[in-house]
Amino acid sequence: MNNLKWYRITPLDVLLFRDAKPFSPGERAWAGSIFPPPGHAIAGAIRDLIQSNITIKLTGPFLTYKDQLYFPFPFSYDREHLCKRENNTAVPIPVVPLNWDNLHPLHSLLETDQNLPQPLVFESKHPFNDKLEGQYSAYLDYETILEYLKTSQISVEKWQKNRIKDNESPQPWKIETRPHNTITQGTRQVLEEDGYFVENTIRLQDGWSLAVGIKAKSEDENLKLTDNSQIIRLGGEGHRAILESCPQLGEQWQELEKISQGNQKKAGKKIAYLVTPGVFERRQRNNHPHCKPSPWEWTTAYPNNPTQEKGYLVSFATDKPLVISNRMRFGDNISTPAPQVYAAPAGTVYYLESNSEIILYQDSNASKQIQRWRDLGYSELLWISYQ
């Protein structure tokens, strides 16, 4: 039984989700904000609301505008290089692994190390033009992603829907910098040590909200969340937001999930599209956890050694890692800073080849530590059958 319920979270003012970078001696006391918020911030707000320690399982968080889900721009398209399509419309150009594009001029000329991810190139049937101009939103609407999952392409009509004006911000939020002063007692002077603190907060644009699916991990437990609007404390400094039930978001997610699961089972070339930050870590030497930008079990699809087992991973497109939080310590001195966790950013795309369904270790009999990341909504993938 799937008892996942979907909710819209609308801030009453600004929000603050401090990044995981610790302050260094001599640096100004700045606190940056990461957005969309990490899953543990959402889970903490829900558990504070229901006053319960039950294990919560999240899907998301995503963004929503007028009750329609929005997802991060996939890195399988290059927003900075455009190509001409129908009616001379300038749209983002797709990138593919070099060995997937037989017509590319470098296909038979460039020697690559098969044990490494293959180089990505602009798809040869869409020659880019550096003189073209245009801006696209950093988040694409549900209908666009639905088409992407169904066809592995995005039509000109859908691109036009997601185009923004030159003076618009690609992200549907703005950053507000707020100083905090601590005054020395009995004076009007700022405290010399730790007296000045600056933080960056997030203000969503009008009409935008967060969207998240919530359920109790165990079907025997009751989440005790009503369908009525409720006020929650979300993020740092006790900022408030409205939590509202929104079944329409659940219907959209179910449709995407249904198509994604079908694509995952298909044989051939596939694209795995990461829609929430991906935490892929394993404990290595001296039991120290190490993070990778891709699942550890995805080995190269073209090993140089003929006796080596063929893997799935052809290549991937990603960006700089996202520092999401400090890692929980068990049995250690918790007063010392814990190591940080680095996640692959949402929008990362993995190019894969397989003759059967690709089953992820994180969704099977994984350890409790890995399951905890999944329960908090991290490493959510949508699957595309490449055509």
Image: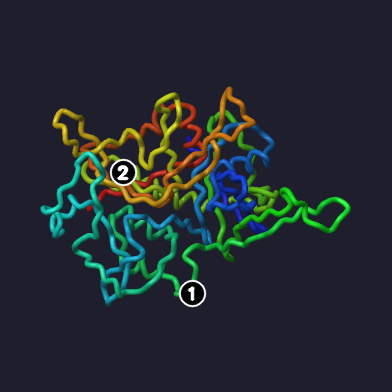
Q: Position of residue 190 (x, y in %)?
A: 78, 56
Q: Quadrant of residue 218?
A: top right
Q: Is residue 4 above or below residue 71?
A: above
Residue 103 placement, left or right of 230: left
Q: Position of residue 227 (x, y in %)?
A: 63, 47
Q: Is residue 168 above or below residue 316?
A: below
Q: Position of residue 282 (x, y in %)?
A: 41, 31
Q: Outermost residue toward the right?
A: 186
The residue at which mark 1 appears reads as 167
Q: Is residue 100 visible?
A: yes
* Amino acid type shown at disc 2: Gly
Q: Which marked residue is nearer to the observer: mark 1 or mark 2? A: 1
Q: In this rendered view, identify the residue nearer to me: 212 or 318.
A: 318
* Amino acid type shown at disc 1: Asn
Circle 1 SS class: loop
What residue lies at 23% left-to-right and 47% top-to-bottom? Answer: 118
The residue at which mark 2 appears reads as 262
Q: Is residue 244 visible?
A: no
